[in-house]
Image (cartoon, rainbow, N blue to C red):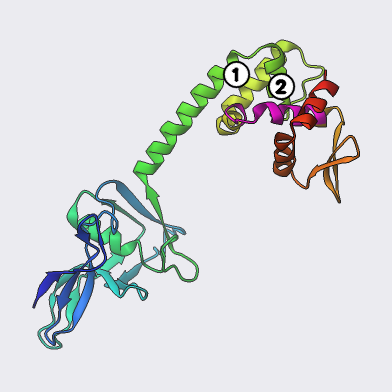
Amino acid sequence: METKPAEKATVAELPLYIEVANKNGFLYKIANYDNPKVCPQSGIIIIEALKRDNFKQPRISFKKVLDPATGITYGIHIGTDNKTGELEFQRITLGDVVQFDCSNVNDRKLWCTISRHESLMGSPFQRGIPKFKTVDKNKEAVKVISNAQSMVRAISIAQEMAGVELYDMAINLGLSADHNDVGLLLASVIEMAAKKPDGFLAVYDNINRNVITVFNRARAVGLIKLDPTNGYIWKDTYPLGTNETMAIKTIVSNVTLLMNMDLCLL
């Protein structure tokens, strides 16, 4: 049996696959699990059954997966069959819950193969109704940390708001600001920052926040209306766009219009 690194399709000087010959000299492309572009080299990944039953556990068994586009085989090569001369691959069985540590070579090979199986949700070769899904613990941890950081920042910004900035942010967040006590208004903005920090920060950090504020204030007092046929219209005569994004873009590109709107809202 001859094994040699492929000379083609390399990423970061590592081959995407290793060529392995069977006893008849036919070369197979077997995925190179040491290449980070083929398979992650670290991280904890859990595979769970989408439907779990105490009486009938979901179970699939297979040996390899072939990528028809590249001809690369994903599987754990364990030798050559003495009778047929064909390559042999380790049988993989999936049950209810399986965990893989991609820093471990064997786990990495298993995960890299399973991740392409047709029964896994999100697999590039998924077919029909999937039976399993993945849970990436590292990605989940990053997401939790990121969400917490966004919440802390959003609440911190909201707590410092006062006066016109507080009123404008309330309008931008879709809150009723006309008859609210300042304390109640601040509490509502802080609550929104805590519940939807990403949405709060998306408004606060937007480079066109002043335009968005003018647009929302004009809508609140009826100077901008939404017509079912023509979209958003300024003072019943000037069309701004069929949706909010287009309307904002129109105002941004027309300084005179923005100044006129601002004066009307004083």
Alpha-carbon distance for marks 1 and 2? 12 Å
Report the residue marked by disc 2. Answer: 168
Residue at disc 1, secondary structure: helix
- Residue occupying image coordinates x 90% and y 40%: 237
The amino acid at mark 1 is Ala
Q: Residues within 10 Å of mark 2 (few under 14, many from 20)?
A: many
> In the image, residue 202 lies at what x, y percent?
58, 32
The amino acid at mark 2 is Asp
Name the image quarter holding the N terminus: bottom left
Q: Residues within 10 Å of mark 1 (few under 14, many from 20)?
A: many
Magenta residue check for 209: yes
Q: Identify the image quadrant of residue 96.
A: bottom left
> In the image, residue 180 lies at what x, y percent?
78, 16
Predominant secondary structure in magenta? helix
Count up the numbered dots.
Answer: 2
In this view, the residue in front, 216 or 83, is 216
Whichever of labels 1 and 2 marks the residue nearer the N terminus, that label is: 1
> In the image, residue 182 lies at what x, y percent?
73, 11
Report the residue marked by disc 1. Answer: 158
